[in-house]
Image (tube, rainbow, N blue to C red):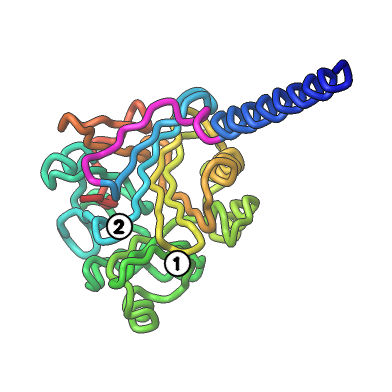
């Protein structure tokens, strides 16, 4: 009888141990996947998800996850003279287009006659901007959407026309960016030195504007990093919390703005607290 009771006691101890172990594993996985994003706005349409991750640096990381490439397009300011273009604020573009999200993109220079977009721009297969030769030879990065609904990230020294001849499947494209993650390597941000980016962009701590995709090209993330963060920190955060295969950065600092339409119809703006009044190129999610 005593032996039987001892056997039951051992069995119950094992059951309690197994249950406790399962509970600890579940809690560990929950913390791993949900401790960073502290707010989440699920849009009406499942193809768009917005997350705001707290506790990174001084501020937040706001990102939009897009799983339907057909919802993404390019906004480009009206052409003025030569290659110069008008600009606008991301919030104004979001309201005018009734977009679900708008994020600033590419790099640009300001001239007395308007903005000069430094990267390639393609919209619905049409060549809208081809970079100047001094930019082309630097092999800057681009983010693209194909006609069959895939996301692409790559680098090129081709003009926009030749790039479209080589890859006729490209529907939308915005270029001028630099590497953050390439083929899953979080140290690829160092390649941006060879892409001709100024030391203040490479070495400073500032707001960051990022586009990333998974290995299959089925999911894209548009993200802004608030506060003062380096390219290294940006890259490591992406690698730690998202299944990123490729990631590129666009102009940050006062150009880093992401506007999101919340379920109640209001627009929420993330990014720099002091945005420039106008920028000439943006990514739009409908």
Farthest bottom residue?
165
The residue at 16%/59% (across/down) is 79
Q: CA distance from mark 2 to mark 1?
A: 35 Å
Is mark 2 in CB contact (under 8 Å) with mark 1? no
**Which range of residues does the magenta coloring cover?**
33-45
Work out whether mark 2 precedes mark 1 in sequence or the reverse, and give the earlier one: 2
Q: Is residue 156 above or below residue 38?
A: below
Q: Is residue 174 covered in magenta?
A: no
Label 1 environment density (alpha carbons within 10 Å; few <14, some 14–19, many ≥20): few
20 lies left or right of 209:
right
The residue at 31%/66% (across/down) is 149
- Relative to the observer, which residue lies in front, 163 or 33? 33
Tally the numbered discs. 2
Farthest front residue?
1
Residue ID for mark 2: 68
Quarter that holds the N terminus: top right
The residue at 25%/61% (across/down) is 70
Residue ID for mark 1: 134
Element type at mark 2? loop
Residue 87: % across, % down: 21, 47
15 lies left or right of 111:
right
Question: Looking at the image, is mark 2 or mark 1 nearer the viewer?
Answer: 2
Residue 57: % across, % down: 54, 26
Residue 102: % across, % down: 26, 44
77 lies left or right of 215:
left
- Relative to the observer, which residue lies in front, 166 or 30? 30
Q: Is residue 183 above or below residue 104?
A: below
């Amino acid at each position: 009888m005593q032996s039987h009771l001892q056997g039951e006691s051992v069995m119950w101890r094992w059951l309690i141990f197994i249950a406790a172990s399962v509970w600890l594993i579940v809690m560990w996985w929950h913390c791993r996947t949900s401790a960073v994003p502290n707010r989440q706005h699920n849009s009406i349409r499942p193809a768009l998800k917005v997350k705001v991750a707290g506790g990174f640096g001084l501020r937040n990381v706001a990102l939009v996850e897009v799983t339907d490439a057909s919802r993404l397009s390019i906004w480009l300011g009206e052409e003025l003279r030569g290659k110069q273009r008008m600009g606008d604020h991301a919030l104004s573009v979001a309201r005018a287009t009734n977009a679900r999200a708008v994020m600033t993109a590419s790099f640009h220079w300001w001239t007395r006659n308007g903005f000069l977009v430094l990267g390639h721009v393609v919209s619905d297969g049409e060549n809208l901007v081809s970079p100047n030769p001094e930019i082309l030879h630097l092999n800057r990065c681009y983010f693209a959407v194909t006609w069959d609904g895939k996301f692409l990230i790559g680098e090129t020294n081709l003009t926009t026309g030749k790039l479209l001849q080589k890859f006729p499947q490209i529907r939308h494209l915005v270029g001028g960016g630099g590497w953050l993650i390439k083929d899953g390597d979080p140290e690829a941000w160092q390649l941006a030195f060879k892409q001709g980016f100024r030391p203040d962009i490479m070495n400073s701590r500032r707001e960051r504007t990022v586009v990333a995709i998974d290995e299959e090209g089925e999911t894209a993330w548009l993200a802004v990093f608030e506060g003062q963060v380096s390219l290294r920190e940006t890259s490591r955060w992406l690698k730690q919390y998202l299944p990123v295969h490729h990631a590129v950065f666009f102009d940050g600092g006062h150009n880093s703005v992401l506007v999101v339409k919340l379920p109640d119809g209001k627009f929420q703006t993330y990014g720099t607290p002091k945005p420039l009044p106008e920028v000439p190129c943006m990514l739009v999610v409908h």
